[in-house]
């Protein structure tokens, strides 16, 4: 046993020397976090070595004893031994350390890169909102183009035409195929802004579906089909939508664009992820302004 203790002490010294050799420069500062880290390393190495030595010695010298449990598996029994004291203390210590870490320790009361980034971002956003509190339509359009090129162009293309059908063509409000798909399958993507959604098969006749899809996709030009009366109950007689009932089918108004950004959208082509909290309100309005300009 004495030789094992001596060997353990030598192992601890070797491990600590290796730790200091690899990361010693990090501890030569006034940062208390680094000092706590070093103390933690010392404690972990010391405890680990002596616990290993204890159980190695126990395996060599101890014999099994105690009351056997009634259950056996393949003839192998199990003793009703209580949880080791060290394990229990380790669990309690881990719980106490967790509370200390989240209430007193780093990073709440210390510097962190995430905290610095959040402070700088909040400061920038406050300046941005103050500067652009009432931008003109031209300013919104120019700002929206910049937002589009960064956030939307990777999927919709720099010309907003959808990269050969891989994404929605934003130069048009909606295509005939998309209207047909929505009528047959319903549309429940924007339920936070339009809670009722759109149930499938509001029109059942193929001729009616084709006429309405052609009329809506053309931008509501020409004679209005009689079957459009079903759609008008939610989207309005002129297709400009109703708040909290149905979105605008005629143009990319602010409400529609903001709803799509917040909820994402799944449709005929594929799925668009939510952009919730990526843009502030001014940027969302700017993007809507730019999209409207594409169809002019």
Image (cartoon, rainbow, N blue to C red):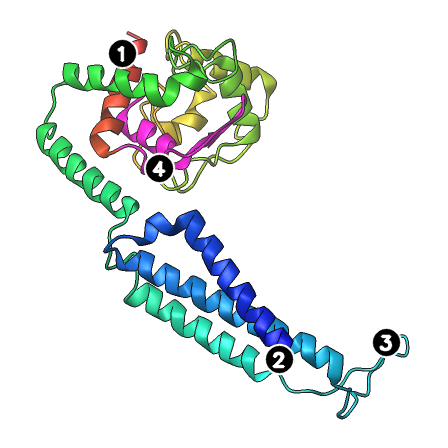
Determine which residue is flagged by label 2.
2
Magenta range is 252-279
Determine which residue is flagged by label 1.
293
Is the C-beta separation of discs 2 and 3 under 8 Å? Answer: no
Is the C-beta separation of discs 1 and 3 under 8 Å? Answer: no
Determine which residue is flagged by label 4.
276
Q: Which of marks 1 and 2 is nearer the N terminus?
A: 2
The front one of 244 and 260 is 260
The crowd level at tag 1 (other Cα within 10 Å; few <14, some 14-19, many 20+) is: some
In this rendering, the label closer to the viewer, 1 or 3: 3
Residue located at (55% from left, 80% from top):
86
Q: Quadrant of residue 4?
A: bottom right
Task: Give the distance between the C-alpha atoms of the residues marked 2 and 4, in whole angstroms.
Answer: 65 Å
Do we see residue 55 in this rendering? yes
In this rendering, the label closer to the viewer, 1 or 2: 2
Q: How many labels does the image show?
A: 4
Residue 38: image tag: none
In this rendering, the label closer to the viewer, 3 or 4: 3
Residue located at (43% from left, 10% from top):
161
Q: Earlier in the sequence, mark 2 or mark 4?
A: 2
Q: Is residue 244 magenta?
A: no
Is the C-beta separation of discs 1 and 2 under 8 Å? Answer: no
Task: Give the distance between the C-alpha atoms of the residues marked 1 and 2, in whole angstroms.
Answer: 85 Å
Residue located at (48% from left, 18% from top):
167
Do we see residue 174 in this rendering? no
Residue located at (31% from left, 23% from top):
240
Q: Which of marks 4 and 1 is nearer the N terminus?
A: 4
Q: Dividing the image into 4 quarters, which one contains the C terminus?
A: top left
In this rendering, the label closer to the viewer, 4 or 1: 4
Q: In which quarter of the image is residue 274?
A: top left
Q: Dividing the image into 4 quarters, which one contains the N terminus?
A: bottom right
Determine which residue is flagged by label 3.
73
């Amino acid at each position: 046993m004495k030789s094992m203790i001596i060997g353990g002490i030598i192992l601890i010294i070797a491990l600590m020397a290796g730790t200091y050799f690899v990361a010693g420069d990090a501890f030569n500062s006034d940062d208390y976090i680094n000092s706590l880290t070093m103390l933690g390393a010392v404690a972990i190495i010391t405890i680990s070595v002596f616990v290993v030595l204890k159980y190695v010695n126990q395996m060599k010298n101890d014999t099994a004893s105690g009351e056997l449990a009634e259950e056996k598996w393949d003839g192998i029994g199990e003793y009703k031994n209580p949880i080791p004291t060290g394990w229990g203390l380790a669990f309690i210590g881990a719980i106490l350390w967790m509370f200390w870490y989240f209430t007193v320790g780093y990073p709440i009361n210390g510097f962190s890169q995430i905290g610095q980034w959040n402070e700088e971002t909040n400061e920038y956003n406050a300046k941005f909102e103050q500067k652009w509190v009432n931008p003109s339509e031209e300013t919104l359009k120019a700002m929206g183009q910049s937002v589009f090129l960064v956030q939307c162009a990777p999927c919709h293309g720099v010309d907003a035409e959808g990269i050969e059908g891989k994404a929605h063509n934003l130069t048009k409000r909606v295509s005939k195929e998309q209207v047909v798909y929505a009528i047959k399958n319903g549309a429940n993507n924007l339920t936070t802004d339009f809670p009722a959604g759109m149930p499938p098969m509001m029109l059942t006749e193929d001729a009616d579906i084709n006429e309405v899809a052609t009329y809506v996709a053309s931008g509501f030009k020409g004679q209005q089909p009689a079957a459009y009366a079903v759609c008008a109950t939610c989207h309005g007689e002129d297709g400009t939508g109703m708040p909290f009932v149905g979105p605008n089918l005629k143009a990319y108004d602010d409400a529609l664009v903001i709803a799509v950004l917040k909820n994402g959208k799944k449709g005929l082509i594929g799925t668009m992820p939510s952009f919730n909290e990526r843009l502030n309100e001014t940027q969302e309005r700017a993007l809507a302004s730019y999209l409207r300009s594409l169809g002019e």
